[in-house]
Amino acid sequence: MLGLVVDARPIQAHFRIPHSSLLLETYPFPPKTTAIGMIAGCMGFGEEEFLQLLRGVKYGVIIEDPGERIEEVSAIYKNPYSPSYPITRVSLYKPRFRMFFLGEDEIIERAYEAIQDPVYVPYMGESESLFYPPGKDFVEIVSVEEGEETTLRSVLPGDAKIKEFKPLRKRIQVPRMYEAPVDFIVKGKSRRAVYGKFIAYSGGFVELEEPLKVMLFDGEPVFVF
């Protein structure tokens, strides 16, 4: 079984949490829809092919560095008689993510080639948050095996029971629950996101109360969904 590992180090990134309007918060990691969307864009896929890829490829992520949290405040001017409310947009400055993809060998091999010679420019969440390869070895194909682990660094399912979080760095993010999009329901011109619950953290690893089914990407245990 083959897997794709991508080392992503954008200068800035914004993965909007869609539940607010005046505060445009960001997820601390690329949701599955964003990560698969980036791969689909590299491959030149349209919406239908993107949705097939979204449902056929599993994804996991490790937050290697959360980056610096930056806030941009702006006000949208409509007309002299409309109230103007400040809008705060939160972005991540120089984060680092290791993104893991698991699918049919042919798709993984095509994605490996496409991300090195993309049809469309890859970006991280928004078109202004461009994907910058950190070096020539930013993407690789690795062997993948099934396994069970209690010690992990990857984003976890929302029902995982954490026994302990062990920091390894000064800058950390303690485990926190998020609802992030994993799929879309398409009816005509309507698009509705389907959400899953996940636990994200960075700067350390977790010990779980019970073993979790994972995929071992060249030995690295990762929860994929």
Image (tube, rainbow, N blue to C red):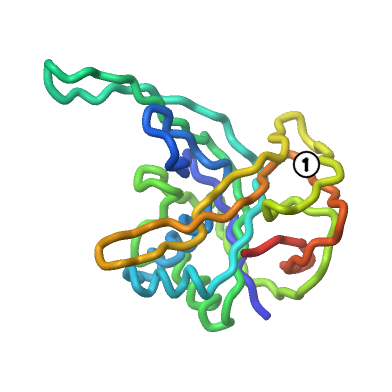
Q: Image check: 172 left or right of 40?
A: right
In the displayed orientation, state which residue is furthest to the front.
187
The residue tagged 1 is 204
Q: Amino acid at mark 1?
A: Gly
At 59% from the left edge and 44% from the top edge, which residue is drawn?
178
Q: Residue 153: horizontal and vertical position, in percent?
A: 75, 51
Determine the image quadrant of residue 74: top left
Q: Residue 110: horizontal and vertical position, in percent?
A: 48, 77
Q: Does 32 sit above or below residue 46?
A: above
Residue 179 appearing in the image? yes
Determine the image quadrant of residue 3: bottom right
Q: Image check: 152 left or right of 173?
A: right
Determine the image quadrant of residue 144: bottom right
Relative depth, front residue between 43 and 15: 15
Which structural element holds mark 1? strand
Q: What is the quadrant of the C terminus in the image?
A: bottom right
Local packing at callout 1 (Cα closer than 10 Å; few below 14, some 14-19, many 20+) is many
At 62% from the left edge and 38% from the top edge, which residue is drawn?
66
Residue 137 appearing in the image? no
Q: Does 54 sit above or below residue 15?
A: below
Q: Image check: 179 left or right of 17?
A: right
In the displayed orientation, state which residue is furthest to the left.
80
Q: Does 26 sit above or below residue 38?
A: above
At 43% from the left edge and 61% from the top edge, which residue is drawn?
37
Q: Residue 2: horizontal and vertical position, in percent?
A: 65, 77
Q: Does 99 sit above or below residue 105?
A: above
At 55% from the left edge and 52% from the top edge, which residue is drawn?
8
Q: Residue 80: horizontal and vertical position, in percent?
A: 12, 16
Relative depth, front residue between 133 and 211: 211
